Amino acid sequence: MPRNNIEEYQILKIIGESEAPLGSGTISEKFKAMDIDISEATIGRCLRNLDSRGLTRKAGFQGRYLTAAGEKALQEHQYDQDLQIKTHYMMRLARAGAKEELLHILVARRAIEKETCRLAAIKASEEDLKTLKSIVDRHLENIQKGLSGAREDTEFHKTIARIGGNKFLAAALDLIRQDGQLSPVFEYIREKVGSTVVTDHKKILQALKKRDPAEAERVMSAHMENVITDVKKYWSIVHETDSKGTK
């Protein structure tokens, strides 16, 4: 992605995440907080360019907000970024042993996430349940728009681990999940085999709402089994395709 596109995406993202209009000074501070070296003058030029394209609009002296076109452009940028991540990791998966590596990761996740989900069913507050529902709703909306749901997938599982309240299990899960970096890989695999996780996430949320630890543990285990099945099915398809290609 060209440098100016990266800057543009970050500016759109910063403005889009704010509830109030933002000026170049505030945006500059946000970049500094992310350790991104970009001058306020450059930000100003980018903002004027975004204005001219109808992606942002001034709100007097308060700053800028995203237009409908800007929100769409932000989604497209996110889709492009997710696609690059998927491509990178699918290239990694081409190496020998990747299938077994992914299966080992999923088996380890299953053991930990069954417990974090059980704990979450006991400890979840109404606010926690609302947060999980908003994640599931965003995930479903992204799928309906043809966008990636990898971020929401990661956020859903991380939130359950946080709610569970065991920081060691949460840390172990982050390590195993490689801080969410493998979510696009699993999403790619599910797309290829015609599967989705959002349906499983809905079932998990329902179990948490019922405050049923045993049911929460069961549906989380079933969810992880579904992902394991998808990985095995994907490699069967790949093997079958390779076999046909060598005939």
Image (tube, grey):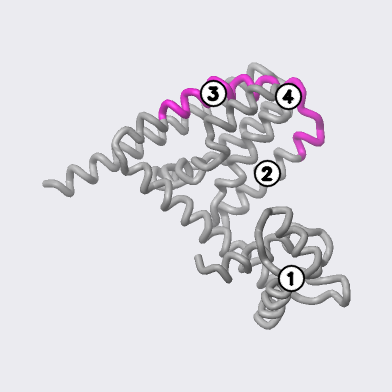
> Where does the magenta region start and end?
103-130
Q: Nearer the viewer, mark 4 or mark 3?
A: 4
Q: State the CA–CA distance, disc 4 to disc 2.
A: 19 Å
Left or right: residue 235 versus residue 110 is left
User: Can you identify the residue that label 1 sits on?
Assistant: 40
What residue do we see at 56% from left, 34% from top?
A: 200
Q: Earlier in the sequence, mark 2 or mark 1?
A: 1
Left or right: residue 114 versus residue 54 is left
In the rendered image of this protein, does residue 189 appear above or below residue 34? above
- Labelled pair 2, 1 in contact (Cβ < 8 Å): no
User: Can you identify the residue that label 3 sits on?
Assistant: 221
Q: Earlier in the sequence, mark 3 or mark 2?
A: 2
Q: Position of residue 14 (x, y in %)?
A: 72, 60
User: Can you identify the residue that label 2 sits on?
Assistant: 135
Near-viewer residue (39 or 135): 39
Q: Which mark is residue 165?
A: 4
Using a 10 Å C-alpha cutoff, classify the residue at mark 4 as few (fewer than 14 neighbours), some (14 to 19) or many (20 or more): some
Q: Secondary structure at mark 4?
A: loop
